[in-house]
Image (cartoon, grey):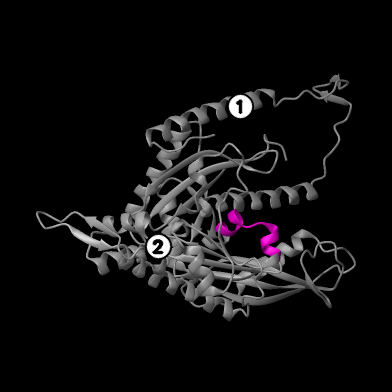
Amino acid sequence: MSLNEAPIIVGLDIGTTKIAAIAGRKNEHGKLEILGFGRANSNGVQHGQVLNIDQTIKAIQQALQNCYESNPDLEITEVYVGIAGHHIKSLQTRGDMVRQDSENEIQRWEIDQLIENQRKTFIPAGDQIIDVIPQDFHVDNIQNIKEPCGYNGVKVGANFHIITGDRNAIRNINRAVEKSNLKTKDLVLQPLASASAVMSDIDMEAGVAILDIGGGTSDLAVFYEGILKHTAVIPFGGENITNDIRMGLGVLKSQAEAMKVQFGSALADEAKANAFITIPGLKGMPAKEISVKNLSQIIQARMSEILDFVSYHLKQVGLDGRALNGGVILTGGGAQLKHLIQLTEYATGLNARIGYPNEHLAPNHIEELKKPMYSTCLGLILKGYSDYEHKYKEFNEKYKKVEVPKKLTVDKTEITNTQEPINVNIEDRVRKMKFWDKFKHNLIELFKEEEDQVIK
């Protein structure tokens, strides 16, 4: 697929603490080139759910405005949106389909039909199916098939992982996006988006649990033998830790957040016993001395609770420490807590590491986007490309290239086509090169203002 054919895809991560909009396109090496990036503080979202639509719209528009400032040539109309929240549920189903023509090889459209049939699965009233993910296929008596296209058989079927969410929560997200003059191209479960950004094929084969610690929720996706085995949304995140610090130490929310980021540790034993943080007093009141040890004990208590949920979900699907050779990959903003890897390994009995979304990014990306908090947003772009490539492949299979005849007749005038075809994409390429240079210059200026790092 050439650079000229690849579309620009935009991921919109509507989170509890931030809203991020990133526009990207795959280059000829299959890496993401970032063409626009904007973020804004989020106010109308709690625990991953849009509660105040007006405030969420303002935040989305601010993130988009910042994205346009980084690249004025962008036109954003459609977005891939992440969804989380404790209303998210998942269930396992099995579906089969008797084929009309068992003599011919199984075609892609039959598999798409099989997947579409699962959307009729009975779910509780008030819920809506967000995604249907096939796990492994079977054709007649042959089990555990990864790719059934090309097999022959009378009956084709699969085990499915179906993700559902609250209808009202989904409607609120769609409404906030539409009122921001955008169209939701697809809703993607956030742990799956994060997984695609930080996970390699080797991780998927080895077996891995991906924990995305966001502001309002912590999202879990478990893969084993190349198959998505389980997803879950844990209703605690970084905001809960901040609120615990605020309540436990009697400080303002902004002070609690600053202390968590600067001095916080997920292991109280690693914190210095004789270290203190001085917090200025309110309106003439004396300054407060906060023990770093006490701060870390509060953080450890809440993080341990989140990790207990992870262990519980792994037991639910029968996967213990011996099965997941890839261990736990920590991502999201909360993954930046000091000593979190050690606490995770202690609590789950699995190896742990931080998942950065670098692997899929082109070399000239923005340093800011290396942070794990942007995994979901970059994963949404990758999800968009996965859909696009699927349709592109399907289109090519359906419509084979037709050879142009040597003689073309237009209004009874004969034209002989003897020359090699002219490359009509030269101007397009030049325009896109200028577009990229202009974008790079704008981004550098934008990040200079924020005293952040710039494009390498």
Q: Quadrant of residue 200?
A: bottom right
Is residue 391 at least partly visible in the picture?
A: yes
Residue at point 12%, 58% (across, down): 286
The residue at which mark 1 appears reads as 433
Horizontal side of 265 relative to 250 (left or right) equals right
Read off the magenta span. Answer: 193-205
Q: Amino acid at mark 2?
A: Ser
Reply above or below: 355 against 115.
above
Marks 2 and 1, Cα distance to the nearest angstrom?
45 Å
Horizontal side of 241 relative to 204 (left or right) equals left
Q: Amino acid at mark 1?
A: Met
* Comes first in the chain, label 2 or label 1: 2
The residue at which mark 2 appears reads as 265
Magenta portion: prevailing SS class:
helix
Q: Quadrant of the C terminus?
A: top right
Percent position of residue 143, x then y: 80, 75
